[in-house]
Amino acid sequence: MEERPQLIKLEDVSKEYDGTVVLSDINLYIRKNEFVTLLGPSGCGKTTTLRIIGGFERATTGRVLFDGEDITDLPPYKRRVNTVFQKYALFPHLNVFENIAFGLKVAKRPKDEIKARVEKMLSLVNLKGYGKRSVESLSGGQQQRIAIARALVNEPEVLLLDEPLGALDLKLRQEMQLELKRMQQRLGITFIFVTHDQEEALTMSDIIVVMRGGYIQQIGTPKDVYDEPKSAFVANFIGESNIIRGTMVKDFLVNFCGANFPCVDKGFGEDVPVDVLIRPEDVQLVEEGQGMLKGTVRSVLFKGVHYEMIIDTGEFSFKVHSTAMQPEGAAVGLSIIPFNIHIMRPMQVDAFEEEEAEE
Amino acid sequence: MSNMRFPPWAIWAMLAGLAGFAAMIAASVRHNRGVRRSLFAYPYGLWMVVFTIIPLLLIGYYAFTNKAGQFTLDNFKTFWDSNYEMNKQLIELGMDPQTLGSARGTVNVDTLVYSLWMAFLCTAICLFVGYPAALFMADREFKLGSTLVILFIIPMWMNFLLRTIAWMSLLEDNGLINTILSAIGLPRMQLMYNSQAVLLGMVYNYLPFMVFPIYNALAKQDGKLSEAAMDLGASPMLTFWRVTMPLSLPGVISGITMVFMPSVTTFFIPRVLGGGNTEMFGDLIERTFLSADNWNVGSALSLIMMILILMSLTLLRKVDPEGEGGSTI
């Protein structure tokens, strides 16, 4: 992939509301034409980050750069970004056409140009002929598409999307995910997308920024954050996981559940406590007596594509996904290949984490 | 005009104001589509029939009859010409009123125009003072907003007679303001017994009726809408004119109606704060009923007033059928 230029850069950005810190030391750059997703649980600061980029919030400290230019103090109406708001925020006193034309009218574009561009947008979002309709007569999905059209018609360099699919049902949401991704690729616009839905993030993004408690946890491609999570939090938040406390015996050898496992990680030192991540689909079930561990099936759930089994080895209850079902109570062996054992530095247990565990 | 209680261009100013109001209603109807009528309006309808329609019929009866109970239009003629009854008697006695120098008495019509003019001024002042106040109160960033709301509400807990009399003790020749003025060596001023004092009393009493409907309309507006406008490139000023203001129009129309209606029927305030030349239509009606003991002419005057009010009520209900604007009061 060619190196795209950096378009937006956040430097040491933090935000406080009345003494409560909601964002700390955010350092982030976003390249041109990237689809970047800010992902995290509610209250992680992802929307605040987006609002700082949009100009609706002012960073308490730090700088925001756009194309190398400092825009920290630039009001939203002078920024070359447009936003799709969470609940669309369509103007109820204007019809569909007037809503989409708003930005162009403010920019004092000629009438026939406005008309042509709005019509083009309406067909882009598959709502041709809806111009005269009142926005309140439209369904959620249609309002959503109007909101996207209203932002895109201004040909922004960056489109900010604040959980735009949150109010749609699953089927519609999946369709819109693909549609948004297609639009982003076709129009060549940088998208910054905020969501708490990890699946959505994995499907659409070029880069995922995982956030928590006002900090960035990890930045990487969807494959990176799924396969190589930097912490148990990221592992847990993105996809399902077994996280076991273990000890790094030496390079390429880890000990957990009372057995030594060969692995592909190194550089942690010797006899160091670590967190071991094993994805449920990476645990292979073998005959009893074979494999590295043995355990008993505690429960079986049918999940459609696969079965989800909880297998108790006495020291740890593994969550296992497999297309082959083992009946409850069966004694089985567990086998894990070295490549699928992922070692992480242990997470500091803080008050924040316990709070989350309660949720 | 027989006297100079209102400037000669008052009627044109009021007509311009009326045109502006009509334009506002048109804009509001255009901007706020899909206004629906509710079933819950029906109990109110019943109330209207019992306590409004029946008294209205009684007033109609008195207005169109004379003291003997016979049908007549004389009461309305008296509205147009306050000397009508007297002149009629003169003619019956075989005399010519004109040679006696008895011309048309314009006091009733003048009082109505004066009342409309005062109400118009009061409404305009309330709008220009009240809208910014409501804007501040509804501003979520402005921390004193809720304090301001309470400050506007507290005086309303007091009876309006009391509030008016309080103004009297401020404005009197030996009132608080003049006492302070003379204490710091400034000349005393004639603050009371003129139209300005009446206007002040009216604005003071009716301002909350303007502020709260507008405040309600502004406060329930989704803050994301103005953010969206700014996001699309509109400066704060343009955001106000394109989004905030059009969406608050139902509140403005409620406010205008709710100030104009009581203003035009104002009584007592002119009697307390005004001089001999500031009688308003409400006082005229009261005087005709009670002092002159003429229920027939009084009813005719009331009917004329009522038609004006019903017209504005109809307008209001067209624009704001749920009465959302006035719900705080």
Image: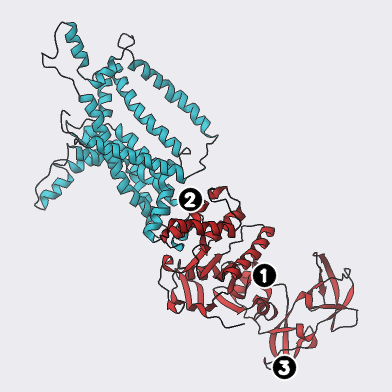
Chain colours: A red, B cyan
Q: Position of residue A349 (x, y in %)?
A: 62, 78
Mark nearer the N terminus (2 vs 3): 2
The three-letter amino acid code for the residue at tag 2 is Leu
Task: Tell me what residue is drawn at x 11 percent, y 51 percent.
Answer: B183
The residue carrying mark 3 is A251
Residue A250 placement, left or right of A167:
right
Which chain is mark 2 on?
A: A
Give whichever of B112, A96 is nearer the camera: A96
Mark 1 and mark 2 in contact (Cβ < 8 Å)? Answer: no
The residue carrying mark 1 is A203
The residue carrying mark 2 is A94
Q: Position of residue A300 (x, y in %)?
A: 83, 67
Q: Position of residue A240 (x, y in %)?
A: 72, 72
- Discs 2, 3: same chain: yes
| Pointer 2 local density, CA inside 10 Å: few below 14, some 14–19, many at least 20 | many
Residue A352 showing in the rendered view: yes
The three-letter amino acid code for the residue at tag 1 is Thr
Callout 3: SS: loop
Give whichever of B20, B199 is nearer the camera: B20
Quadrant of res B195: top left
Callout 1: SS: helix
Mark nearer the N terminus (1 vs 3): 1
**In the rendered image of this protein, does residue A2 appear above or below residue B309?**
below
Quadrant of res A87: bottom right
Which chain is mark 1 on?
A: A
Task: Tell me what residue is drawn at x 43 percent, y 25 percent.
Answer: B51
